[in-house]
Image (cartoon, rainbow, N blue to C red):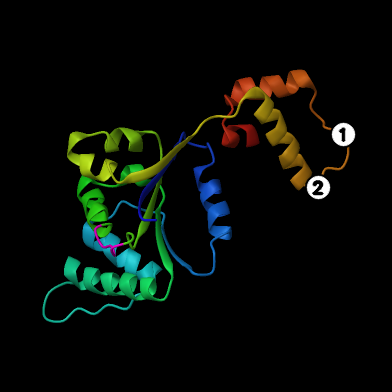
Amino acid sequence: GGGFVLLTGEIGAGKTTVCRCFLEQVPPRCNVAYIFNPKLTVTELLKSICDEFRIPFRHEGPGTPTVKDYLDPLNEFLLKTHAVGQNNVLIIDEAQNLSAEVLEQLRLLTNLETSERKLLQIVLIGQPELREMLARPELEQLAQRVIARFHLQALSEDETAQYIRHRLSVAGMGRAQPFDRRALKRIHHLSRGVPRRINL
């Protein structure tokens, strides 16, 4: 229902996989903008959001497009889609790379609301330093708008064994598990329960 959702985890913990799984299950009346390279200026970010939502924009007059050139059509889009019962979600992957200025602009985007709810849900996905960033005093206003947060932990020893069985099953292995208990324990120890390391 609007505001920010925060998903964090170590490198290789499966954040992008969780995101892909979510994208495969998006309901039909939901528009999604997905930004995977957030090392952008405020203007570049707004342009990317408009592009992702397929919002046409125009710049009149001399010079380069301004923040307002993108904000006005974006606000109009959010209001129109809300009026017909659609939800809008902006997902930003690798969000630990966002500048403080861009994070502040994102906070301002969540200001657009009706009397019932905000018109844009923003999902920030990033490494643990994203949590540290949002704990800074200058980002307190944004941190207060985080309505849900989850940190993807590494897998336990039992979860690692289940994960390996699942991966092998999906790959089509029909015979018995090729790794004994000691091998699974060793894989967990070497990978420290991080799925990407387990895959390797």
Residue 22 screen position, x and y as percent: 54, 54
Q: Which mark is residue 113?
A: none
Specify whether residue 167 is in view: yes
The residue singled out by tag 1 in the image is 176
Magenta stretch bounds: 111-115
Quadrant in which the N terminus appears: bottom left
Above/below status of 179 relative to 121: above
Specify whether residue 54 is in view: no
Residue 27 screen position, x and y as percent: 54, 64
Q: CA distance from mark 2 to mark 1?
A: 12 Å
Above/below status of 169 relative to 22: above
Tell me which residue sits at (33%, 64%) in the image.
48
Query: Which image quadrant is residue 46 in?
Result: bottom left
Tell me which residue sits at (18%, 66%) in the image.
67
Indicate the amino acid at tag 2.
Gly
Give the structural element (helix, strand or loop) at label 2: loop
- In the rendered structure, the answer to whether residue 141 lies left or right of residue 130 reads left
| Dominant SS in magenta | loop
Tell me which residue sits at (37%, 56%) in the image.
121
Residue 139 screen position, x and y as percent: 22, 41
Quadrant in which the C terminus appears: top right
- In the rendered structure, the answer to whether residue 189 lies left or right of residue 106 reads right
Tell me which residue sits at (43%, 71%) in the image.
85
Indicate the amino acid at tag 1.
Ala
Q: Nearer the viewer, residue 21 or 194?
A: 21
Above/below status of 75 relative to 125: below
The residue singled out by tag 2 in the image is 172
- In the rendered structure, the answer to whether residue 30 lies left or right of residue 98 reads right
